[in-house]
Amino acid sequence: MHKRRNIPLAVGLVAAALVAWSCDREPAPVSPLATEPLFHIFPGEEVACFRLTGGGRIDKPEPPILMPQPKNTPDSRDFATFGFQARPNACNVPNGSGQIEWVEHNPNAILGGFSFHGVVNWFVEVEDHYGDTGNPKNGCGRFAGNDGRVHGRNGQRFENVSFVVEHACDRGEPGVGRDHIRICLGTANGPECELGIADYRRDGILTGGNIQKHKLSGSGA
Amino acid sequence: MTGMNLRGPRTIVLAALAAVGGLVLPAERMEAQTVAGKAYGTYVNALGVTAQSPVATLPSTGGMSVGDAETFGVPSAIDARWLTAVTTGAADNPVSSSQSTSELENVSVLDGLITADIVTAIASSSQNAAGAASDAAGSGFVNLVVAGTAVTTDVAPNTRVELPGVGYAVLNEQKQTGDGVTSSGITVNMIHVVLQSLTGGGCTLLGCLPGVLTTTGEIIVGSASSRVN
């Protein structure tokens, strides 16, 4: 069992902290009744009344037009796998809970590939950039936190890592070829992730597994 | 789904018939739904040793569970690094789902008889108004080598490979369960080695009798299962 140490992120990684925004858009502050930490809701984001669970695999990046993507060949380590559960703490509040495990296998990625575990503090609803399916049982969530830990394949470990799943989208079953996900490490800011301002970013349409939208009132996650 | 409308006389008649004659009116499904999920990196029952890497087990009502280890090994049986097992899911009405993944890197089975850079098992099950289904999409190997022969293509489900003097292995072993309507499940074992030895047999003046193959143990690498019902 390795000892945990507080180590700032290596070159290229941003230390997890409250991010000071100076963008032109003025984010709407959350209700004063919200508990710490305080997150801002950006345009395009809404408070949510559903939860998500998911697990699976992505290979190639999300294409401009939604279409199923193949797995990489059996000699390729360029893929990532994940599992998560995430939810708002109550209907229509942005504070959230849950966890995510993310494994990056590409040896050319940061840290030579890594395993990441994150704790969710914030959950909102976002639009699907591929367009609405028209089925109310489908939808996308965005969730983030500042309490993540990374274990690199090069042996390095980091704690207090910020992350955001910029979108996790349920577009129907089976999830392969339909559902899609994007994650960034080094920021808990969705728009920054969307713009590529992050130390690690990966997205893809699922080549395995499923992302599922559930009612918030159900059991489990 | 329609509920009962108690405002009209026709509906009152129908309600009476239902009460007296047991007529079943359409109603929303209210059966309790459950999910199951399990994932682990390796299980060994061989060479006098029984051992298993950390197991992720999903509660029947859903949630998330993780089992991981940086290294795991049983001498002469299995050696692997970066084992990560995750299972998530939720029981809901009308949609329930369960997803499990198991991954290992730098895998060596039986002192290098089977090796792989990465082994990935994925089991996904979901149930909605249209029915229930499961699949193992995304499961696979990176740089798999069996008895010195590199496997350069995706391995088809339930591919059996003979291992002379050892037994046999089933690669990408998949077992489906459920009726596909109200239940569905799948178990994926990416490498399932069955160890065998020849016992008995021999020759006498009266003739020779063949020996019997006896299973003496098993090794499982990369296991993920999920179920909804």
Image (cartoon, helix red, strand yellow):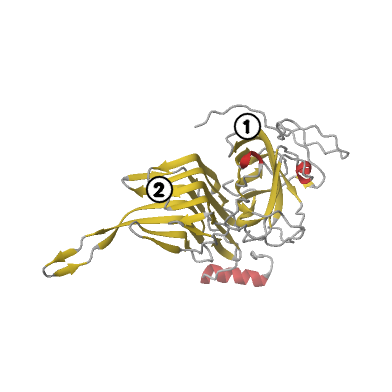
Quadrant for residue A100, please give it.
Answer: top right
Instruction: Name the residue rendered at 60%, 71% in the picture.
Output: B14
Please report the residue visible at 75 percent of the width from the left and 36 percent of the height from the top. Answer: A39
Which residue sits at x=34%, y=44%?
B49
Q: Nearer the viewer, residue A73 or B173?
A: A73
Q: Chain of mark 2?
A: B
Q: Is residue A51 visible?
A: yes
A151 vs B143: above or below: above
Q: Which chain is disc 1 placed on?
A: A
Which one is nearer the viewer's eye here, B83 or B64? B83
Residue A7 percent location from the top left of the image: 64, 28
Looking at the rendered structure, the secondary structure element under dot 1 is strand
Q: Amino acid at mark 1?
A: Glu
Does A26 appear above or below A202? above
Give the residue furthest to the front: B148
Residue holding disc 1:
A159
Disc 2 is placed on an element classified as loop
Provide the residue designation for mark 2: B111
* Residue nearest the viewer, comparing B104 with B176: B104
Residue at the outermost top position: A6
Q: Quadrant of residue A158?
A: top right
Look at the image and tell me whether residue B58 can be seen: no
Q: Residues within 10 Å of mark 2 (few under 14, many from 20)?
A: few
In the rendered image, the vertical position of residue A53 relative to residue B29, given as above or below: above
Q: Nearer the viewer, residue B186 or A7?
A: A7
Residue B133 screen position, x and y as percent: 55, 63
* Left or right: B202 as drawn, with respect to A207: left
Question: Do marks 1 and 2 share a subunit?
Answer: no
